Image: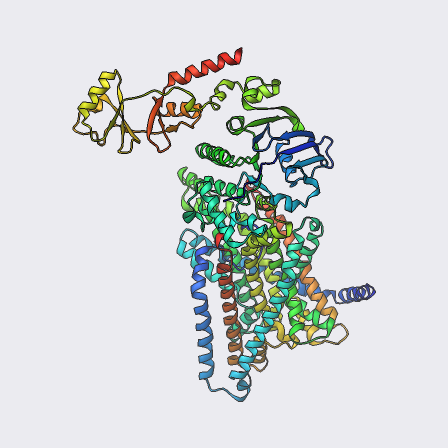
């Protein structure tokens, strides 16, 4: 993808910058979270603060946050990758733009708006009430990358595969998909970061998560709680992005690295 | 279908009724996004120009900007409130920070991608560094830089909606209002108006970018 | 040991390909018998449909009309994937799967045919040796670590892995440099002399066709067969002006590719070994009325040419210029001519173990050309 493609990716576009981040990001996450936690717990916490700032609540919220992120990611993978594969088949060429259009609108729409609308429409609350609209918003990177990943494969390879006797399903499974994996992983990383970031909005539909801590701190005007919640959310996001970068780097086929 | 049409009609009435307020919010939304994009562009292009010839500098600048992008916008807002208060300040700070990566990255890649032979020729005929930069390199890198700005703006349109939480300007206000008044008469319409309004504006501004790109890119390098 | 499959012939009867929206068919009623065990070349200008015709044999393109029989079986009634597993397929860009190792690439078709693991591994090593790649070195490499020529060899190994009786090759040597191309062509001829597959080979290079083919089909628009005959016959008697134009003005020079070094008389030159004294060698050169001697190593392999003038020193070591291009008795006269031009003098001929057996002189080659030209005109 060239610099002039208006595409949002988490990649910095520079291999050295990616290496730098691979080393420093987890350290930054740990330092940030550790630092803020140390600071918060070294203060004298009043009764209101203790409600949010105790190990139990913090761990619970973090775990909820992880669950929401996981739910969104699973939804995105289960929908976007098969859909992306299907849309690259010859017979689907005409309807592909429709789905891409829908997913693009999904990404252009504000996450908070989609979450609120889904809530108002279904009157549901909780984890899935957040995960479903968030998955819709995070779809596009994986969908587009799956399609581009398959389309950019040298047609001579598909020809060679069919020519030596692979069925078209076998070519898909053993040639096209493995070669598309690097791009799919890059899209997955983008989606993951979008998911962990927008999961902070789950609080608005009672889905819990670290956004809940941030909101609590805001509502009761306690800076310690506000900053702790925010720092934890940032730390988690940095960690998830780092895991995504690792996956991108090491889960792809060896022959392509 | 009937339900959607009824909703649609309902929405239309709501929008036309509340037009002044909605229009003002839409204008504020677009305005803050565009202004922040421009501020980020000034900072980002400046940083890009400063570091693109240094591998270490580019690496650090790009790494920093891309790391900022992974920070959840809601969390960033939360981090900023204790320090800069509510309203416009946290909104602008957060938006500018987010807009940085696409612009910094594309500036570095764009400037770095200028054919060395071209800059060499420019120096050779007597242009000094500044002239080479402004007359040659920046103009050749412009499509990439503009594309970066376009990505930033798209991103900011969505993020600005969250800023309403911290009493920031824009259509996000409608969305939060609709949420808080769930069950009330026009709650859904408010959320719809806010969301659809943002999407429409994003599409329009994206189109504007394409026009600007066409107008400002020299014909010789148009893709 | 590979099972010896009897070679099969291919019958194409009225094979036609029509694309919707085009007035003329791309291939119009193509009828031909391809003999078993032969290398049949489809040669013609770009766009004449030769690749389309070949790809109908393994049904990568489905014929609009006509019959195709391979070894007596009706190709059009078989399952296409099954059919292709029994036909080798090698293309110009090699088409090696970049995410698989060389071994995995070659093992693809045997894997599809459900051979057991041990048999596949043995076969992969055998195939790599066959195409001149040392298995221990290349088994675990990835395509991007190979040169263009090496990739093509792996492509051929992959095509032959399941021991198909038929091999389809679509300009397989087109994407490599001329020297590598020459080597690969020689390798293919060596393979074919051992395996005797039925090969259908598409190329636009008539020189390549003459060098490799047992039979050549010169194709025109819509794959119309302009002439289908042995290379000698086409060179001697082009069927019409189009074929003559394609063969080109240098028909007799092209016939040089049909003759081998072993078909002509070799010259001899003064040779010396490194331990001989320069003075002795100089005496021998002058006695022979020549100017040069060829220095050989302990195994009789040519090392350097030395001029009489360079023999003033104490030892032969380090004198003279290294021999550049060598030819073997298998090499074509065209290769010999190129070697002569590269060396600027006689070309050195080596035997099976690389030892010196004689030289090819320009006079001999020119005389041969004259002979051929006279035959041609009669």
Q: Quick one: C177 or C297, which is closer to the camera?
A: C297
Q: Is residue C93 above or below residue A31?
A: above
Residue located 45% across and 62% down the image: A21
Q: Is residue C307 visible?
A: yes
Q: Quadrant of residue B24?
A: bottom right
Name the residue at the right extreme: B2
Q: Picture coordinates of residue C106 (x, y %)?
A: 51, 47
Question: Foreground residue, B203 or C312?
Answer: C312
Q: Quadrant of the C terminus of chain B?
A: top right
x then y, percent, for residue B23: 70, 63
> Which residue is drawn at the image coordinates 53% and 65% (left, top)?
B70
View extreme (bottom): residue: A47
Q: How is the image coloured?
A: rainbow
Left or right of A213 on screen, residue C31: right
Q: Quadrant of residue A48?
A: bottom right
Q: Nearer the viewer, residue B117 or C42?
A: C42
Left or right, B54 with reference to A150: left
As rendered, which of B80 and A88 lies closer to the eye? Answer: A88
């Amino acid at each position: 993808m060239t610099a002039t493609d208006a595409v949002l990716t988490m990649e910095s576009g520079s291999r050295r910058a990616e290496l730098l981040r691979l080393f420093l990001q987890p350290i930054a996450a740990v330092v940030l979270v550790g630092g803020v936690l140390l600071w918060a717990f070294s203060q004298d916490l009043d009764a209101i603060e203790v409600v949010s700032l105790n190990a139990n609540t913090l761990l619970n919220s973090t775990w909820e946050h992880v669950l929401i992120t996981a739910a969104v990611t699973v939804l995105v993978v289960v929908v976007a990758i098969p859909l992306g594969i299907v849309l690259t088949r010859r017979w689907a060429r005409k309807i592909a733009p429709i789905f891409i259009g829908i997913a693009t609108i999904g990404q252009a729409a504000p996450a908070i708006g989609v979450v609120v609308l889904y809530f108002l429409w279904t009157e549901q609350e909780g984890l899935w009430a957040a995960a479903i609209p968030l998955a819709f918003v995070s779809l596009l990177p994986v969908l587009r990358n799956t399609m581009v990943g398959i389309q950019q494969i040298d047609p001579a390879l598909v020809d060679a595969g069919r020519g030596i006797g692979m069925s078209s399903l076998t070519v898909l499974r053993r040639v096209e998909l493995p070669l598309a994996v690097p791009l799919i992983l890059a899209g997955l990383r983008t989606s993951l970061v979008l998911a962990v970031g927008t999961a902070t909005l789950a609080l608005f539909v009672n889905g819990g998560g670290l956004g809940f801590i941030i909101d609590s701190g805001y509502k009761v005007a306690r800076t310690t709680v506000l900053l702790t919640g925010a720092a934890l959310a940032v730390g988690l996001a940095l960690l998830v992005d780092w895991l995504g970068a690792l996956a991108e780097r090491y889960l792809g086929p060896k022959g392509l690295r | 279908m009937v339900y959607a049409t009824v909703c649609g009609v309902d929405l239309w009435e709501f929008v036309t009724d509340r037009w002044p307020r909605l229009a003002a919010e839409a204008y504020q939304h677009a305005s803050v996004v565009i202004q922040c994009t421009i501020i980020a562009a000034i900072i980002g292009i400046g940083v890009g120009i400063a570091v693109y010839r240094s591998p270490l500098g580019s690496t650090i600048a790009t790494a920093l900007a891309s790391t900022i992008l992974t920070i959840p916008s809601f969390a960033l807002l939360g981090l900023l409130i204790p320090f800069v208060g509510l309203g416009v300040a946290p909104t602008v700070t957060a938006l500018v920070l987010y807009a940085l990566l696409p612009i910094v990255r594309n500036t570095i890649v764009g400037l770095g991608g200028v054919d060395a032979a071209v800059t060499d020729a420019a120096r050779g005929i007597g242009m000094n560094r500044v002239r080479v930069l402004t007359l040659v390199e920046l103009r050749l890198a412009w499509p990439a830089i503009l594309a970066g700005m376009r990505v930033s703006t798209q991103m900011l349109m969505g993020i600005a909606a969250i800023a309403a939480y911290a009493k920031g300007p824009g259509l996000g206000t409608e969305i939060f209002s609709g949420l808080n008044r769930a069950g009330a008469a026009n709650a859904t319409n408010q959320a719809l108006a806010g969301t659809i309004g943002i999407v429409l504006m994003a599409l329009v501004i994206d189109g504007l970018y394409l026009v600007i790109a066409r107008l400002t890119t020299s014909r010789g390098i148009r893709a | 040991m590979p099972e010896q499959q009897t070679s099969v012939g291919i019958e194409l009867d009225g094979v036609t390909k029509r694309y919707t929206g085009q007035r003329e068919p791309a291939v119009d009623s193509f009828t031909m018998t391809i003999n078993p065990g032969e290398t049949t070349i489809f040669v013609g200008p770009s766009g004449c449909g030769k690749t389309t015709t070949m790809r109908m044999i393994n049904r990568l393109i489905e014929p609009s009309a006509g019959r195709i029989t391979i070894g007596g079986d009706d190709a059009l009634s078989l399952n296409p994937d099954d059919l292709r597993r029994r036909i080798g397929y090698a293309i110009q860009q090699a088409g090696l799967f970049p995410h698989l190792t060389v071994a995995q690439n070659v093992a693809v078709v045997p894997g599809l045919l459900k051979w057991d693991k041990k048999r596949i591994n043995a076969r992969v090593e055998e195939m790599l040796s066959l195409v001149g790649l040392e298995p221990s070195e290349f088994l675990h490499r990835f395509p991007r670590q190979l040169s263009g020529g090496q990739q093509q060899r792996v492509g051929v190994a992959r095509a032959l892995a399941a021991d198909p009786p038929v091999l389809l090759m679509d300009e397989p040597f087109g994407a490599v440099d001329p020297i590598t191309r020459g080597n690969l062509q020689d390798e293919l001829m060596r393979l074919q002399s051992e395996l005797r597959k039925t090969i259908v080979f598409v190329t636009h290079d008539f020189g390549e066709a003459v060098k490799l083919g047992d039979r050549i089909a010169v194709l025109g628009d819509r794959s119309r067969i302009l002439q289908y005959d042995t290379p000698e016959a086409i060179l001697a008697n082009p069927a019409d002006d189009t074929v003559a134009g394609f063969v080109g003005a240098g028909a007799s020079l092209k016939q040089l590719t049909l003759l081998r070094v072993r078909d002509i008389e070799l010259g001899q030159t003064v040779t010396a070994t490194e331990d001989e004294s320069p003075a002795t060698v100089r005496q021998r050169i002058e006695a022979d009325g020549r100017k040069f001697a060829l220095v050989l190593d302990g195994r009789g392999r040519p090392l350097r040419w030395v001029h009489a003038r360079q023999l003033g020193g104490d030892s032969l070591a380090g004198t003279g210029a290294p021999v550049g291009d060598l030819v073997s008795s298998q090499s074509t006269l065209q290769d010999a001519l190129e070697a002569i031009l590269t060396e600027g003098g006689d070309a050195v001929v080596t035997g099976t173990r690389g030892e010196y057996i004689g030289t090819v002189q320009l006079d001999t080659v020119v005389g041969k050309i004259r002979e051929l030209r006279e035959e041609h005109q009669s």
